[in-house]
Structure formats: C-alpha cells, structure tokens
Amino acid sequence: MSWVAHPTVFAEPRGPAPFSDIDSMMTEAVAKGNIPGGVVVIGHNGKIVYRKAFGSRSLEPLREPMTIDTIFDLASLTKCIATTTSAMKLLEAGRIRLNDPVAAYLPEFAQNGKQDVTVRDLMTHYSGLPPDLDLQSPWQGREAAFQMAMQTKLQDPPGSRFVYSDINFETLGFIVEKVSGMQLNEFAEANIFAPLGMAETRFLPPKEWRPRIAPTEYDEHGDMLRGIVHDPTARRMGGVAGHAGLFSTGDDLAKFAEELLSGHRVLSLSAVVKMSTPQQPPNAASLRGLGWDIDSPFASNRGELLPVGSFGHTGFTGTSLWIDPVTDTYVILLTNAVHPHVGKSVVSLRARLATAVVESLQLTVGEEEKLALARITGYNESQMAARRLSVRDGDVKTGIDVLEAHNFRELQPDPSRPVRIGLVTNQTAIDSRGLRTPDVLSRVPGLQLTAIFSPEHGIAGKLDTTDISQSQDAATGVPIYSVYGESDAKRRPSDGAMASVDTIVYDIQDIGVRFYTYESTLGYFLEAAAKAGKQILVLDRPNPINGAFVQGPVADAGRESFVDYWQTPVRHGMTIGELAKMFNAERSIGARLAVVPMEGWMRGDWFDSTGKLWIDPSPNMRSLNEAVLYPGIGMIEATNISVGRGTDTPFEVVGAPWIDAVKLASYLNARKIAGVRFVPVSFTPNASAFANEKCGGVNLISTDRDAVDAPELGLEIAAALLRLYPDNYKIAPLDTLMLNRTSMNSLAAGEDPRRVAEDWRDSIQKFQELRAKYLLY
C-alpha cells in the first residue's frame, strides 16, 4: 500500500540469512549493556517478516528472559498511538478542528497569553509551551495537572519554534476528554484498541499482566516500577495522560502499524495521510505530522535509508515505531533501556536497525515516487531534508537558449513564407551569450519579427508610469506596442496588432509572485491569441525565488484583476511556462499554446543557482534579496507605509513618519519570525509614499531565506503596526493585493498573524494538487 503514486517496491531478502545483521546488532547491544533486552517486529507488504526477542526482560531484582509477548511501557509512543489517534477520530467526526484555538475547547487555557495557540500547534509541538510541568513542587492528581497546564506561560510565540513538549499532549488529552465526555483511556480502548484487537494494550495494566511487563527503574521510594508508568508527570496524574502511560506488546503495535498502512478500520485514509504528512508551520525546519515525527531532531529511528515520506515516534523508555507507506514497511523496537537505571541511549541502535531493515529487504523507490516525495521534503534535498534547499552552481539553459539549440523548430521558420512573429518582451529577455531575444529572432531566416509588445515599465524596464506610448526598437526597427496603461484596454494587444502576426512569442523574466503584472500580461496574450486563432509560444525562465515553496493566501474567486489573473497563492512556486499551461487550462482559454522548457533548472533553485545574469525585471526589483521579501512587503504596500520605493533598497525597508523605529524593531524581533531580523532605521524616500519625509522603520535582514515565509512576514508587520499604532495605521487597503477577505477580516480583528496564516494551509494544499498537473520540472 502506498500513499505516494503506488511505487514499485522490490523486496528480495539478501542472502540465506537476510536479517542476520539485525540479530547481530541486537545481540551486541545486549552484550554491551546498552539494553537489558528487546523485542523487534518488522512488517512488510502486509506480513510480519521478522519477530524476535533478545536478552533479558528484567535484570533486577531478578533476572528474567525476554519473551516475544513482553509488555512494555511505551512512554511517549502514547502521544501517537492513543492521544493523536483519539484526536483524529474526533476531527473526522467534526468535533474538533485543527486550526481552532485550544481555548475553544478548554476556556481556561487562554490565560497568560495562550489564546492564539491552536490544536495544530499542540500536535506539531509548535505551541510555544515549555517542555513539561514543574515537578519541583509536590503536586498530585489530574486536577492539579490540569490547572498547571492551563496556567502555564508561553516561552515562545505560537508557531515560531519547535520545542518538544509533554504539556502539548497532556493538554490534547484533556481536549479529547472534554469533547468526548470519556476518560482518555476509555475513549482509546473503545475506539482504537478494541476495534483493532489490541487486547494487550492499555493504560493502567492489571496486576495479572505484571509478570510479563518489562520493569523500568527504581522510583523515588526505591521501588522498581513494573506496570506503573515510568514518566513522573503521568505517574502523578494517576497513570493516564495524553503524553505517556500506555503499555503494549510488539504484536499489538504490529496490528496498529498495519492499520495505518492498509486497514482504515479506525481512521480513514485521508485522516492517516493528514496526520503523517507535514503539518508544522510553513518552512519550519523540523518536519512534524500531527503527533508523528517525520524529520525533526528526534527522527533518528528513520535511519539513513528510509525515505522522508515515512513517519514514526520514540519513547523515553527505549521504544520506537517507524512506518513507511512508500515501501509498505514498519519497524518496531521495544526495549526497557532505562532498566535498572536511566543513563543508556538507544538512539544509535534505532537508526542502525532501520537502516539494516532497508538493506535486508533491499527496498528501493522508483524515480516517480522520489519526485512525489519531494512534495513532502522540498527539492534539491540536503542532509536533514528539513525543507532545506541545497545550494548548487547550475548552468541553466532558458527557453530562448533551448529554442536556439533546436534551430527554432518550434516556430517552423519558412524562408519562402516567413512566419510573422509578435514578441512580448522587455530588457530581461537575453540568451546565454547576452543577446536580446528581439535581435536573435530578427536574424533567423524564415522568421519575420513584425511587432514587439512591452509590458509594465516599458521595453527597457525603467518606467514607473502608465503613460507609455508606442515607439520603435532602435536595433531592429520593429514597432513597439505598449500593453500597459490606466485602462484594461490599454493592457491588451489591439486587434490590429494581433492581425500583423502569425505567432506570439512570450519571453519575460517573472518574479514568482501573484500580483507581479507580467503574469497578467501573459494571461491577456493567451486570451488574445485564442481570439485571433494565433499560436503562442512561451519561452520559459526560472522562478527566481524557486519553485519549491508555495506560500500565502489564495486569492478569492471572482476578484480577478490585473494584479490577480488567477486564484493562486501569493507565492505560487511556478515558472512562467507552467503558469501559461495552468492559465490556459483552468480559465478555459483554449489558446494554441506551446512552452519551450528550460534545461538544467531544478525546482529548488534560487536565482543564484542558475548561472544566469541578474537583470532588474522592474525598476524597484534590484536584487534577489528584495525578491525574497517582495511577496510579503509588496503585499502590504497599498497600506499607508513606505516600502522603500525612492530609496536604494526598495522592499528591504518599511517605515512611516509616525513609526518609532526602535519600538517596532523590538516588537518584531520578539515575535521570533523565522528567517528574518529587524534593524531599526530612519530613511527619507525621494519618491512614492512619504516622498521627502523622514520615516522611522525597520530594515529587514534575511538570515535564512529558506525559512522566510514572506506573505506571513507581511502579515506580521501589518499586525504589529495595527497593534502599536492603531490610530495611524490604515490596514484596510492591505486586501488590495492580498485579495483574501477572510484573512483580511481576521487580521483587522486583531487575530494573531500566525493563526491567520494557519488558515491558508488547506487552500494551499488544494492549489498544490492543482498545480501538480502543470509542473514541467
């Protein structure tokens, strides 16, 4: 079973003893005293292919041999198996929502600034809560734990940083109980364990099970813990908690793993996929599902070879479970490594075990599945695959380079009857030799360049006016028609100009942002070509801010305009050629479209990885740094602030005469916004908003461009200005370019920008599924 394009998986055990490496490493771990003993269960293609016990179940007070039916304290595996699955049952029933504030279910939780923490934040460990409840004071009981969790103060803003926290799942357990009306252990038994036949899985195991339970360590009174939860917080809570307390066997966990891979008696496939694919804040470094780990610092039990599309979790006592839907494989390791004393680590053993399983079963994944997995891991995958793009020195051939290499066959030159070409272009259209596309096409026998169409900013890309008149290209003598102006009609080619050409060629460098008007110009020419019955050929160019990340709100339907040709997120992660294919199909334009793809471009390439010369695509887009910030800073430009137009660093500064620079920078830095820092500055723009007025504000420093979610950054700045300067800042015009009324209303109402951004997740996912049909790379 696979959730990723049904891969072809080859599983041929290596040699006569395919699992001998596993036998050896487990025997060695016991001999070295790293673990008293353990149970390993491996499943593949719906069957258990390995099941064995090693070493001792108990060393003190008496030595007992490990048996395959030993019951283990699962520790934090409780979070996934009991609490997460219970929460997902309630989510499927519509009784909880991931983006709801926790306080919607537990009103007491809102105190001490936690009103914006969501259920999703709890389940991904991005809540901002500290790691655990205070164990220094002598509290006891579930009610005391509940009150402490409700009163806990945040140590980080919600969504800003991954901190593994037991309080997250203690609180999630309380939500399950509040919504279901049942104790967590009762709900899990009725809705998970009983339906799956997990008869030896439960909180508070009965006394008759104790001879088969693996002991952990001595408690504070000197008594060996056996059948009593090891975790001290769960123990004070009476043994039932959302973060720890569950006991189980290898065989029962195999039933659970198989359920997630192919059963769907407890959860639907969509729910399983939801909780086992990345749900952390966009571009966060640690990949977390809902409850499950995908690729965080705690994901060592994935090993070196299991793909990042797999998921799992560990437990402090020495337990782990890793599940790989791509190869239909699971690996269960149960030990009581804390017995008889805490101090030994099984981190290395977990990793080596997972790697040995892949090697023993000779698991491989096809190229198609690797591409599909890239939707989870990001592209140009680097060491930790934590949505980090590796930097490379590429040599990209753009569409015009490829067209030249093909001897222009896509245009079908005919010297006896030259093909009349209308070229939509500007200063960015050069080939690898530095030749302009107009010059290249004008010299091809069998082609006749009869018209050039210039977009916003004119043929040279230097004008900031709507008054751009027709002119003539000095080098070729070809007339240049402006397709930019105040009216919609002036932004489209005239019927007369279209009649003078046989084929439209589009070659302009885009910036990768929805409201950058070159994209609408493309759409208008698709419409014009369809209307006139002309072919249109798009010469593709890189998305300078890469094609891996998709960010920001999707534009509302019915609000299409020259700054919103189609319902895409602000940062769509597509090239201009891919957009052309999508526009033509999704808007049912029906143009005779062809795209000349690039060669050598990878989706994770920032512009500096392409080997191409940076040419300012517009007067105020002067560097890649500005392009990184533009999806957010440009989005808020319509409000009453300066974004640095009229300075040397447009889109790298934000300010206004009424802003206290130090106060704003301090507030924004305290928000711990990923990938960016803020330096208080004063500046005086010589054009545009607040021209010749001294402005206080911030200089934005990108510290990690892979981590920057620029549209959310824009919201953060707008929310900060609204909070600090409610009488000065006019937020309503923000929706001019954001074009998402739900987000606008939430932000204007004072909702935390991270909460607003979380609500983009589902629409972004739907868009990514749509855009997948049109991706060329």
Image (cartoon, grey):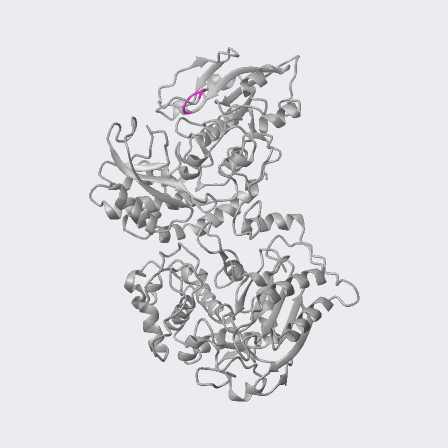
Residue at image position (61%, 68%) is 258
Above or below, 528 against 269 in this view is above
Above or below, 343 against 327 in this view is below
Q: Is residue 296 left or right of residue 258?
A: left
Above or below, 342 against 324 in this view is below
Q: Position of residue 139 (x, y in %)?
A: 34, 78
Which quadrant of the figure has residue 17? bottom right
Q: Is residue 504 visible?
A: yes
Query: Camera-side residue: 690 or 345?
Result: 345
Q: Position of residue 767 (x, y in %)?
A: 48, 46
In the rendered image, which quarter contains the N terminus? bottom right
Q: Position of residue 54 (x, y in %)?
A: 66, 77
Q: Is residue 565 visible?
A: no
Residue at image position (36%, 63%) is 102
Residue found at the very far right of the displayed protein: 16
Which quadrant of the figure has residue 48? bottom right
Q: Main secondary structure of the magenta part?
A: loop
Residue at image position (66%, 67%) is 43
Magenta range: 456-460
In the rendered image, which quarter contains the C terminus? top right
Query: Camera-side residue: 108 or 45?
Result: 108
Query: Camera-side residue: 254 or 490?
Result: 254
Residue found at the very far bottom of the displayed protein: 208
Q: Is residue 524 left or right of residue 198?
A: left
Which quadrant of the figure has residue 53? bottom right
Above or below, 95 against 211 in this view is above
Residue at image position (52%, 52%) is 386
Q: Position of residue 21 (x, y in %)?
A: 71, 66
Q: Number of marks in the image?
A: 0
Residue found at the very far left of the displayed protein: 727
**Magenta-drawn stretch contains 254:** no
